[in-house]
Amino acid sequence: MSATRPGHKPKCKRCRNPAVVQLHSHHTAFCRDCFLLYFQRQVQRAIDGERMFSREEPVLVAVSGGKDSLALWDVLQLLGYRTTGLHLNLGIGAYSVLSRTKTEAFARERGLPLLQVDFGAEGHAIADVVGLTRRPACSACGTAKRHHFDRIAMEHGFPVVATGHNLDDEAARLLGNVLRWDMNYLARQSPVLAPSHEKFARKVKPLFRLSEYETAVYAFLRRIDYVIEECPNAAGASQLLYKDVLQRLEAEMPGTKQNFVLEFYRRARSQLFAGNLEAPTTCSRCGLPSHRPVCRFCSLLDEVAAKRQGVRPLAQTSS
Ligand code: SF4
Ligand SMILES: [Zn+2]
Ligand SMILES: [Zn+2]
């Protein structure tokens, strides 16, 4: 972090009014209005630069009720895009109840359309799946989320699904993938995942240039009421450790996270993986994209059903 002289009040780099936020990685400071403008421009730059979607395309925005996804929905609306929210009620106790309440209130107050999927009603509330299968919660949750993003996008005619992943999420994910040298995940880590299957919606991350801090400031300045509590299953996740390590590097060397992620996208990824992505085939059960004959989600449902009946699952879940 750069030091501020005692008594020195930073000024907005754009309009010279008193600044309310300092961005050390950009060596700059902004007043409220200029920060909001900066935020919008970063999102627009991500959308245009990566050709995420056009103004004519309807965008399905995955909204958890947290600051990132609600900030994303908010800024896309302000920028004039056609958006519909998709909330997945994961069935993780009080956390899920609060997440749904905040998401519904956000949509209602702004008159925005919101689609919902209730994992409990679908028979796979995450708390039940974990209890029955002993799988790590985040693995089961991620599998189910990806399935429903594609299913809802396909059923409702959305060519694109936007998620609220920010720069910190991308940096932590990249660090984890590099530490394991997971070439498959590295190849698929991108701000835009283009459809490689007719039933596969384009996945985009319009906040990938903005840090978690910047998203939190945006949500605060825009008075967005979001769920502050983390998912109880996030505690102890390696992702949090990676974020902590990266934050310590960032504190000593502002701009580290930005360089790490943006240069991977700009230079390294295309050189490492040009044309190497294996296209998925089709799951024989649900008809959605899969890299195996029966997709991970259908295998998960088999496992849950088998545990409920006390028998072995039909399809093995490991790959
Ligand atoms: S922390 Fe894990 S279980 Fe909780 S919402 Fe995220 S992926 Fe799902
Ligand atoms: Zn200003
Ligand atoms: Zn399937």
Image (spheres, grey):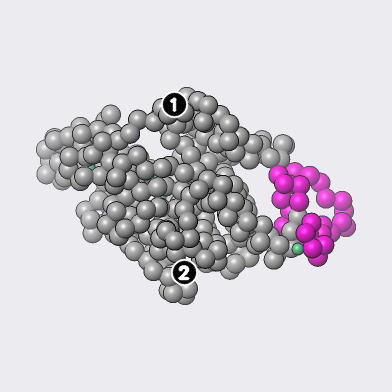
Q: Amino acid at mark 2?
A: Phe
From the viewer's perspective, is 313 left or right of 16? Answer: left
Q: Residue at x 61, y 59 (%)?
A: 40
The reply to whether residue 287 is in sight is yes
Residue nearest the viewer, comparing 193 with 296: 193
User: Along the polypeptide, which appears first: circle 1 or circle 2?
Assistant: 2
From the viewer's perspective, is 210 left or right of 51? Answer: right
Q: Amino acid at mark 1?
A: Met
Which element is circle 2 on?
A: helix
Q: Which residue is mark 1?
A: 183
Asked if 64 appears above or below 51 in the picture, the reply is: below
The secondary structure that most of the magenta stretch takes on is loop
Residue 3, given in percent of the width and then of the height, sits at 81, 46
Which of the image's four quarters has the C terminus?
Answer: top left
Asked if 153 appears above or below 300 in the picture, the reply is: below
Residue nearest the viewer, comparing 10 with 304: 10
Residue 66, given in percent of the width and then of the height, sits at 48, 58
Q: Residue at x 25, y 44 (%)?
A: 288
Residue 139, given in percent of the width and then of the height, sits at 35, 40
Residue 47, given in percent of the width and then of the height, sits at 53, 51
Magenta-tinted stretch:
1-28
| Mark count | 2
Q: Which residue is mark 2?
A: 106
